[in-house]
Image (tube, rainbow, N blue to C red):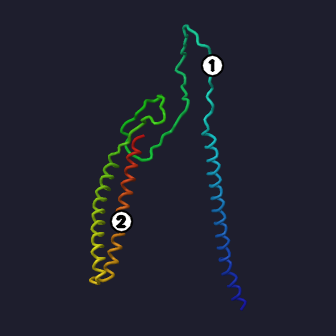
Amino acid sequence: MANASGAEIQSSLPAARKRSLRLLVVLLILVFAGFALWRILTTGERTGREQETPAIPVGAAKVVKGNIREILSGLGTVTPLATVTVQAQIAGILMSVGFKEGQIVKEGDFLAQIDDRPYVALKQQYEGQLVHDQAVLDQARTDLVRYQTLAKQNSIARQQYEDQVFIVKQSEGTVATDKGLIAQQALNIYYCHL
């Protein structure tokens, strides 16, 4: 009996170690997740402060007629009033750039054109699929009207009529999906013009 209780104690030790090891792993995961969350939140606060634009100093002087003596002593450094990073919403080949380096641009000015041909071709494909799926839907609706008449006369099984109702709903869903794909491609084409 003494040997049996000794074996039970030995077999329970690995289970206790496993539980404590699991607890330790869970605690480490929570600590790392908390640290990552803290880093994300504090980084967001810093970038918000960094985005504030500093005031640009403005001076005033009297206007006088005369020669202006301008002396250029070297190449020097030009610093812009403001710098903007533009990121495209989509990926593609850059076809043209609408500005020169150092040029002052205003909101709404043409900056760049990304090749929109893949998106136009895909949109045309989805439009063709919509025409096909719309025809399938129209045919399913016509069959449903026929089945309704036959079901009222008890000329067909009720299940056949109910199946046709579901076929119409499936076709309506397919048409709605096609319209969404076309709208997505139209948006991608719009995003090609920056």
- Quarter of the image containing the N terminus? bottom right
Q: Which SS class for mark 1?
A: loop
Question: Percent x, y for residue 114?
Answer: 38, 42
Q: Residue at x 29, y 84 (%)?
A: 154
Q: Residue placed farthest to the top in the image? A: 66
> What amino acid does circle 2 point to?
Glu
Q: Residue at x 29, y 65 (%)?
A: 138
- Quarter of the image containing the C terminus? top left
* Camera-nearest residue between 117 and 27: 117
On screen, residue 108 above or below 176: above
Q: Residue at x 33, y 82 (%)?
A: 158
Characterize the local packing of mark 2: few (<14), some (14-19) or many (20 or more) Cα atoms within 10 angstroms.
some
Q: Which residue is mark 2?
A: 172
* Camera-nearest residue between 177 and 5: 177
User: Would residue 166 be found to the left or right of residue 58 on screen?
Assistant: left
Question: Percent x, y for residue 42?
Answer: 65, 49
User: Would residue 96 be found to the left or right of residue 3 on screen?
Assistant: left
> What amino acid does circle 1 point to?
Ala
Q: Which residue is mark 1?
A: 60
